[in-house]
């Protein structure tokens, strides 16, 4: 809060505002009270901040201290009579801000954003010096405007496209006639962190001629003026660096950015003509100020009075700049509520990247809009910042400046006519106080040309095609064999269009968006020879789903089961589209040396030198109809279920000749080369496993570990699977995004520490609540956002609420937040609430732990930074030189690609050109370098390798590394760095034969090994492994594992006696040598060697 | 020599340590901690005079290997494994296919029951007389009795999981017919007991009819109680007297204050979280 204490701020209730509106702008609120600055709050906050900083701890230590007990006031404090200030303060928070929490949050936000007074102190003397310097510049001799040769001496280029060459008039440099601060700085509306202060430089009258508004002459003089300023300022001691920029991306209007010596701000110099120098009426939108005969040469066929509205607005904006800013200062300067709201709106614009592009919605327009709302009395200067913010956003959402422009001009009768006039020439209309300038002249809505132009645009690619609905259309066919290819159609389209219409050869066009796709592919040696393009696995998933639905049909039509089936639900990740590597049907043939058969199953011989191919069971839960015949006993139910499994196996074999194998807990079915694992469930079992008889003979419900597992498997997971399946159907890239996220988590060896479902939920959050971005449009963007979410969400203080299926009501959010806050210490470190599970967070209950979560956050932050940097570097754009032409081309290109995508890939087609993380779709990069060499193939390979960087875990972190024998790892071919050709085992496609046996299912020795390690040595160490082809297990000793402990039987496991305490009691310490040897004993046959990094830890 | 050992014995609560190693090739040794079994709660399966209690037994040790270690002391009658010291017999699985007791995982404790009391005495004496550091470690997995570990063990486990369907079927059938008999028996007994007082003189009354009785469950009881409470509260007038109005105002204020305080804390927490960029918009 930066308000001065002695400056009273008027506070009133809502009623007072209504009154204020009726009475005009008089002070209507009667119960004025002094605004209470919350010094106490601030003090408390600051103190707390310091305490926590000192508690910081690095590496694997607990990062966040356990939450302090919430501030509880004693009863006396709660009920003491209130002071007037306190009462007002509390009421104000309640009525004006909804809640005091929100108010405090806004205050904190503003504090972050506002410019500190320290900076002002630095700025003002500097500005003074600059003024001094500029006003004492020397005059320069006059030159012809068409002659630019003299500039070479100055060692500076003109920041303007100089087309056509010819120009009338003279240019002679004079020092500026006036220098003043303009823009947000005066109103204290500058946003951090990039503080830019606009300084207006008045071009002296003597330099201009009255006809200068014509034919770009003004623009050229302005650019030359800047060029000279730049060349002299470069030599000044005040300045560290000068560079040109385009204000709001307008290529006609360069401005000069000055970075001062060791000062934390930049200054933007904006030259402008003296006020009232040109006649305003010259710039009415209908007027022509750029003569076609001059611009296009004498051969032009255009009429001489063709309107030049955009040019007019551009010059006019300079002319009116100072005046408009003064207007704003007058209107807004005295209202802190309005100013705060504008600041927040600026932050909002910035977050959405609306303010950065040519024709964007700049902070200036926003400020003008607030002024407009003030004028039409939609907001008042007494409102709180929150109220203003709400009103502005609401009005914005309702406004349609494309058909109903607005004006700040008071002379309604005159300007009303004008507005219509303006509408005919501009798309968006918002007039300033004079009624002449359209502030939004450059803003454009997407314009779509007519369909006839289609053929011309696409050239030979276009052809007449007949569609299924009978329509015959002009269309362009883009070939794609897999979903991954389909996503890349964009690239083909862009390359084609750019080549045809801009003459840019495809090798200079690069698409950012598919760089990570190859992490989801499998090597060819693991695919059946007849398998079509694998892409990123979407087709493989589809194939499984197809088999699954035919299996469902079979199950439903099985005859002879004593009870009927009520539901069939898949629970494996593949049924949610989230299986990182979906299985492909291959024939499983293992040699007689390795395996033999037992009934329908393949069993292993003990001395196998190589693990058989990995076969993943696809779990399906089948609910049987409820019946009185189900016994009232859990154990008996289990037997009945087993009997069902046997029966089902027999029937499926008999009726559909499927290969089946029953087990007590499930039945495995081999179909189409996939193994489906059917688990029969009965609701009664869950009820019975929860029931507990109390001593009074009342049946109570109590959750046990066992009942929770059962509930998860038979109730929660099926439901979640169908919900996420819905999300998968809605967003085609959900699957690939989720799989990429899982792959990354695993590659960081954290797969065992975060449940699969938890990752899926996190990814689904990106699609359900993408704000402040839009829904991601490519897996890569989704992955970047996933990293962003992980590194930025504050798990300690806020729950992640996932509104799956929109089942949450408004009150649910409040309720969850409330229970979360009050029960924080007992809840898991990562708390995710979904409609089926509001308060427990089932999927994150056991993992990740605080420590792992902390590590994950750090890793995500690192990965995000690295990846963004790599993506940026991989495509340096160098188009600044010919920016003007390029922008125009790109704009028309945008509209077309938008259309093209609607036709081709069904991807919605807006292509915002901003940074990777924020843009929802692919990013287009054009190397506009006509002379650069074409990139060689090697280059491409290297590039892919660099993107792998974040998928390689840092090894120096681990204390012990257990290297495994690659041949014993069934999923070795999925490894991030797996080299094809190491093991050549061509796969044959699956073929049904009558006497086939089930392959070895779900046998992964590494999983077994990890389980044993965890069971035996959980107390001492954490184990990390990449389940997708990892070739080692990372071991990290727990922080206090080596501390000597007193001799106790409960802690004796794995320890030995060493030394004694003072009282003569024996101490025990871990027997590290033996433990290390046990690591290899437990993994006999699997472990290759154990690498100990003793430089990190010592055995005493 | 003996003194150092006895002191270690006393220090570690009367335990003696036996060095062991996995195989001849092993370089490191670990220690079993042994003591005669002496507890208050007695159980006939672990007679105090001939039972040796052993702690820190590695997960891969089986009964055979324990017998091997103590074969020199006397004939071992029985070896019992537990996760932690327990009085009774370890729970055993009654079925080959349905596991109701998970096998012990990780480090465990063992009770070695010798055939004769002399076995226990021998074991204790033997260990007391040898200095731990000098004693050659016992080998757990000699060539004559290799313990299944690693790949071998997992393959075995995988193969064992494939059930013999015929046997499974038979087992289920017998279990279910037994179960049915028990249920039937209980039913009959309940019928017989109807109207007959039990040993304390209580008579159980059961309703036989189409209309179901109120279930005796926790949830139902809670429901009934909540209903009553609601009924009672509806009868009460809350802002009838001035003091009530005043009080409700006070309470509202207190509520606001409480919330304010809580919010203050939350903001503080948010600010404190070091990784957070809560208030930095970009």
Image (cartoon, rainbow, N blue to C red):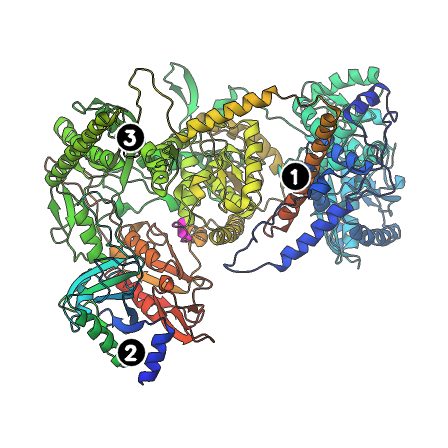
Task: Establish whether labels 3 and 2 are both on one chain.
Answer: no
Foreground residue among A315 and A923: A923
Q: Is residue A330 magenta?
A: no
Residue drawn at the location 56% of the way across and 60% of the way down = A57
- The residue at which mark 2 appears reads as B132
Q: CA distance from mark 1 to mark 2?
A: 73 Å
Residue B170 vertical placement versus B104 (above, below): above
Which mark is in front, 1 or 3? 3
Residue A625, x across and y down, in percent: 27, 24
Task: Establish whether labels 1 and 2 are both on one chain.
Answer: no
- The residue at which mark 1 appears reads as A350
Residues shaded magenta = A746-752
Which mark is in front, 3 or 2? 2
Mark 3 surroundings: few (<14), some (14-19) or many (≥20) residues within 10 A: many
Residue drawn at the location 40% of the way across and 36% of the way down = A735
Which mark is in front, 1 or 2? 2
Chain at numbered mark 3: A
Mark 1 surroundings: few (<14), some (14-19) or many (≥20) residues within 10 A: some
Chain at numbered mark 1: A
Image side of residue A510 versus residue B186, left or right = right
- The residue at which mark 3 appears reads as A682
Residue B176, x across and y down, in percent: 17, 34
Of callouts 1 and 3, the N-terminal one: 1
């Amino acid at each position: 809060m930066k308000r001065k204490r002695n400056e009273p701020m008027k506070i009133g209730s809502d009623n007072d505002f209504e009154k204020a509106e009726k009475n005009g702008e008089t002070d209507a609120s009667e119960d004025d009270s002094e605004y209470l600055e919350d010094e106490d709050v601030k003090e408390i906050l600051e103190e707390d901040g310091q305490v926590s900083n000192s508690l910081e701890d690095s590496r694997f230590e607990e990062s966040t201290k356990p939450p302090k007990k919430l501030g509880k006031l004693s009863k006396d404090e709660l009920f003491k009579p209130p002071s007037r200030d306190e009462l007002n303060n509390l009421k104000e928070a309640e009525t004006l801000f909804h809640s005091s929490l929100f108010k405090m949050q806004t205050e904190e936000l503003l504090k972050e954003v506002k410019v500190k007074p320290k900076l002002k102190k630095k700025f003002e003397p500097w500005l003074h010096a600059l003024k001094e310097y500029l006003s004492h510049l020397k005059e320069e001799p006059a030159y012809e405007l068409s002659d630019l040769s003299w500039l070479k001496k100055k060692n500076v280029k003109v920041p303007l496209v100089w087309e056509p060459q010819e120009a009338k008039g003279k240019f002679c440099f004079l020092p500026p006639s006036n220098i003043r601060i303009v823009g947000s700085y005066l109103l204290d509306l500058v946003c951090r962190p990039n503080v830019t202060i606009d300084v207006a430089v008045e071009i002296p009258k003597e330099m201009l001629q009255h006809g200068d508004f014509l034919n770009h002459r003004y623009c050229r003089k302005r650019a030359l003026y800047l060029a000279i300023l730049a060349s002299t300022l470069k030599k000044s001691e005040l300045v560290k660096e000068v560079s040109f920029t385009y204000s709001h991306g307008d290529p006609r209007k360069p401005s000069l950015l000055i970075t001062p010596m060791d000062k934390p701000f930049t200054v933007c110099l904006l030259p402008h003509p003296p006020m009232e120098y040109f006649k305003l009426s010259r710039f009415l939108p209908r007027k022509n100020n750029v003569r076609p005969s001059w611009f296009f040469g004498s051969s032009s066929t255009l009429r001489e009075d063709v309107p030049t509205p955009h040019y007019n607005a551009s010059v006019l904006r300079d002319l009116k700049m100072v005046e408009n800013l003064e207007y704003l200062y007058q209107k807004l300067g005295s209202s802190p509520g309005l100013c705060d709201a504008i600041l927040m709106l600026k932050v909002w614009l910035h977050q959405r990247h609306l303010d950065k592009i040519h024709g964007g919605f700049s902070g200036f327009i926003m400020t003008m809009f607030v002024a407009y709302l003030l004028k039409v009395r939609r907001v008042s200067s007494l409102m709180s910042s929150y109220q203003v913010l709400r009103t502005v956003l609401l009005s914005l959402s309702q406004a349609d400046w494309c058909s109903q422009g607005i004006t700040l001009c008071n002379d309604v009768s005159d300007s009303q006519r004008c507005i219509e006039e303006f509408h005919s020439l501009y798309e968006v209309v918002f007039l300033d106080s004079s009624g002449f300038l359209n502030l939004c002249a450059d803003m454009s809505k997407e314009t779509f040309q007519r369909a006839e132009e289609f053929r011309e645009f696409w050239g030979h690619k276009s052809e007449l095609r007949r569609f299924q609905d009978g329509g015959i259309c002009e269309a362009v066919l883009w070939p794609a064999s897999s979903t991954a290819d389909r996503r890349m159609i964009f690239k083909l389209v862009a390359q084609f269009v750019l080549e045809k219409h801009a003459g840019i050869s495809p090798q200079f066009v690069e698409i950012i968006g598919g760089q990570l796709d190859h992490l989801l592919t499998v090597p060819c040696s693991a695919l059946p020879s007849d398998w079509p393009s694998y892409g990123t696995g979407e087709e493989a998933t589809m194939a499984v789903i197809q088999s699954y639905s035919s299996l469902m049909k079979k199950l439903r039509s099985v005859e002879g089961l004593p009870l009927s089936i009520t539901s069939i639900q898949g629970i494996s990740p593949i049924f949610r589209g989230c299986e990182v590597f979906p299985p492909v049907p291959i024939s499983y043939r293992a040699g007689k040396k390795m395996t033999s058969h037992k009934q329908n199953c393949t069993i292993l011989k003990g001395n196998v030198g190589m693990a058989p191919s990995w076969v993943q069971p696809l779990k399906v839960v089948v609910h049987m109809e409820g019946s009185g015949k189900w016994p009232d006993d859990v154990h008996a139910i289990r037997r009945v279920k087993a009997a069902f499994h046997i029966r089902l196996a027999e029937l499926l074999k008999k009726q559909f000749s499927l290969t089946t194998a029953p087990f007590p807990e499930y039945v495995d079915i081999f179909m189409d080369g996939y193994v489906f694992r059917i688990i029969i469930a009965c609701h009664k079992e869950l009820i019975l496993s929860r029931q507990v008889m109390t001593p009074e003979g009342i049946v109570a419900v109590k959750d046990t570990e066992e009942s929770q597992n059962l509930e998860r498997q038979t109730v929660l997971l099926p439901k979640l699977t169908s919900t996420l399946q819905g999300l998968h159907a809605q967003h085609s890239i959900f699957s690939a995004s989720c799989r990429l996220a899982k792959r990354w988590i695993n590659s960081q060896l954290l797969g065992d520490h975060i449940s699969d479902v938890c990752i899926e939920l996190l990814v689904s959050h990106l699609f359900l609540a993408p704000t402040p971005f839009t829904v991601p449009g490519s897996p890569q963007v989704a992955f970047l956002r996933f990293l962003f979410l992980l590194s930025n969400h504050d798990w300690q203080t806020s729950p992640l609420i996932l509104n799956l299926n929109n089942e949450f009501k408004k009150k649910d959010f409040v309720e969850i937040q409330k229970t979360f806050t009050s029960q924080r210490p007992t809840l898991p470190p990562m708390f995710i609430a979904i409609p089926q599970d509001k308060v427990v967070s089932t999927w994150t209950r056991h993992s990740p732990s605080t420590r792992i979560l902390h590590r994950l956050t750090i890793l995500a932050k690192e990965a995000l930074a690295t990846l963004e940097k790599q993506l940026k570097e991989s495509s340096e754009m160098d188009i600044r030189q010919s920016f003007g032409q390029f922008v125009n081309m790109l704009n028309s290109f945008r509209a077309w690609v938008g259309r093209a995508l609607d036709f081709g890939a069904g991807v919605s087609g807006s292509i915002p050109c901003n940074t990777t993380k924020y843009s929802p779709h692919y990013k287009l990069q054009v190397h506009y370098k006509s002379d650069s060499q074409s990139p060689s193939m090697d280059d491409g390979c290297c590039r892919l390798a660099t993107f792998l960087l974040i998928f390689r875990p840092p090894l120096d972190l681990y204390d012990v590394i257990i290297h495994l024998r690659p041949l014993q790892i069934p999923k070795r071919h999925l490894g991030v760095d797996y080299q094809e050709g190491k093991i050549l085992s061509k796969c044959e496609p699956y073929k049904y034969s009558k006497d086939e046996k089930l392959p070895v299912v779900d046998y992964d020795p590494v999983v077994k090994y990890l389980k044993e390690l965890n069971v035996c040595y959980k107390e001492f160490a954490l184990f990390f492994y990449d389940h997708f082809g990892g070739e080692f297990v990372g071991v990290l000793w727990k922080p206090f594992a080596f501390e000597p402990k007193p001799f106790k039987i409960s802690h004796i496991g794995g320890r030995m006696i060493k030394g004694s305490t003072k009282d003569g009691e024996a101490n025990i310490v871990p027997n590290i040598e033996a433990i290390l040897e046990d690591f290899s004993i437990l993994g006999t046959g699997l472990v290759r060697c154990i690498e100990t990094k003793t430089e990190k830890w010592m055995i005493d | 020599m003996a003194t150092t050992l006895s002191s270690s014995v006393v220090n570690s609560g009367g335990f003696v340590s036996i060095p062991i190693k996995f195989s001849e090739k092993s370089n490191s040794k670990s220690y079993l901690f042994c003591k005669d079994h002496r507890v208050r709660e007695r159980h006939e399966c672990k007679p105090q005079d001939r039972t040796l209690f052993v702690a820190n037994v590695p997960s891969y040790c089986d009964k055979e290997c324990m017998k091997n270690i103590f074969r020199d002391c006397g004939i071992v009658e029985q070896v019992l494994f537990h996760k932690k010291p327990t009085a009774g017999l370890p729970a055993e699985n009654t079925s080959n296919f349905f596991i109701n007791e998970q096998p012990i995982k990780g480090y465990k404790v063992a009770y070695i029951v010798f055939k004769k009391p002399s076995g226990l005495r021998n074991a204790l004496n033997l260990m007391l007389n040898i200095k731990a550091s000098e004693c050659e470690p016992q080998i757990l997995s000699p060539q004559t009795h290799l313990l299944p570990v690693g790949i071998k063990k997992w393959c075995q486990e995988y193969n064992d999981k494939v059930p013999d369907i015929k046997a499974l079927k038979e087992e289920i059938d017998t279990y279910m017919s037994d179960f049915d008999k028990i249920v039937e028996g209980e039913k009959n007994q309940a019928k017989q007991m109807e109207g007959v007082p039990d040993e304390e003189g209580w008579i159980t009354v059961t309703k036989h009819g189409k209309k179901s009785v109120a279930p005796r469950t926790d949830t139902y009881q809670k429901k009934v109680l909540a209903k009553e409470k609601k009924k009672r509260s509806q009868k009460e007038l809350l802002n009838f007297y001035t003091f009530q109005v005043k009080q409700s105002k006070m309470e509202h204020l207190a509520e606001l204050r409480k919330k304010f305080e809580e919010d203050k804390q939350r903001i503080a927490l948010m600010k404190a979280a070091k990784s957070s960029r809560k208030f930095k918009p970009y």
